[in-house]
Amino acid sequence: MKLSEEELQKCVLDTQVFTRMFPEAKLKIINALKAKNEIVAMTGDGVNDGPALKAAHIGIAMGKKGSEIAKEAASLILVEDDLSKMVDAVAMGRKIYTNLKKAIQYIISIHIPIVLTVFIPLALGWVYPNIFTPVHIIFLELIMGPTCSIIYENEPMEKNTMAQKPRPLSNTFFNWKELTTSIIQGLMITLGTLSAYQYAVYEGYNEAMTRTMAFTVLISANIFLTLVNRSFFYSILTTLKYKNNLVALIIGVTIAITGLLLFVKPLAKFFEFEPLNLSQLGIAAGIGFISVIWYELVKWRKRIA
């Protein structure tokens, strides 16, 4: 209590344990830690703990033996008064936060090629300017919705989640590096889709076949992007072992519906598609694979750094 603010700020970083603390001293320590840009959690149950619980970034009160004042001041209440539940709560919070970011990054990445594939042929006056119609966009949106909301929502926690340091409060939801990653992924898929378009034109394919090639590349890239973006650190070979049965279900449904659109005549006619032979299908799927799988090299460099 006799230390100056500067002395206390140094003291709190060098001292592991303070015991037999007055309520005023607890509050002073919390403010000193916050001044050093630390993320501060405070546990308490008594009436006198109220100010410190309120001042901490995360005030944690005991649900059973905690006073009403402590509960009101806290942002988290441990129903069973079990301190180990704090670790579970942090883990769950980090898992939800990470999965939400994965879903949004996926949405950013996959929308870029959809927008640009519609816009560029029209803006540059390519031979088939209206390569995708509203019905194609609607179908793509129906595929992407379940992917981001169902697959990523149910992803398990990655094994390095709890080894990461707390995020500074000054951090935004996305930093520029993460946003740039999503944009580059989207541009690479765009490059692959438009390359398939130009390949089809070069081969002398008609508009329906060109549309089918570009659409198949986009669907393939969507599938591979779903798998690659399940982790921005671990390899796709690792994430394939994650326990999430919905991944196989959603991807299987996507492949099945795409197959129906391409090879069932009434549906193909409605979507203005033409059936692809094995070679054309392989080229389209291969372009979709290459336009996404390059990010595995980036993740590999992260792991060896």
Image (cartoon, helix red, strand yellow):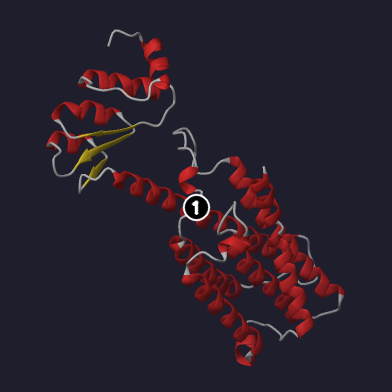
- Residue 121 visible within the image: no
> In what quadrant of the picture does the N terminus appear?
top left
Image quarter (top left, top right, bottom left or bottom right) of the C terminus = top right
Residue 25, x across and y down, in percent: 26, 18
- Residue drawn where x is 75% and y is 68% of the image: 287
Q: Position of residue 11 (x, y in %)?
A: 39, 16
Q: Is residue 138 above or below residue 239?
A: below
* The image quarter in which residue 193 lies: bottom right
* Residue at 13%, 40% in the rendered image: 65
Q: Nearer the viewer, residue 293 or 218?
A: 293
Above/below status of 40 relative to 97: above
* Residue 232 position within the rendered picture, expressed as x and y whole percent measured from the top left: 59, 52
Q: Is residue 34 left or right of residue 52?
A: right
**Which residue is found at the position 59% from the left and 64% from the top?**
227
152 or 141: which is nearer to us?
152
Question: Does residue 218 appear left or right of residue 94 in this picture?
Answer: right
Between residues 78 and 202, which one lies in front from this camera angle?
78
**The residue under label 1 is which amino acid type?**
Lys
Q: Residue at x 81, y 75 (%)?
A: 200
Pick the front one: 185 or 233: 233
CA neighbours of label 1 inside 10 A, class few (<14), some (14 to 19), many (20+): few
User: What is the count of numbered marks?
Assistant: 1
Question: In this image, 274 relative to 105: left or right?
Answer: right
Q: Quadrant of residue 86?
A: top left
Image x and y of residue 105, in percent? 56, 54
Q: Which residue is mark 1?
A: 159
Q: Is residue 136 left or right of residue 117?
A: left
Asked which secondary structure carries label 1, the reply is: loop
Q: Is residue 262 visible?
A: yes
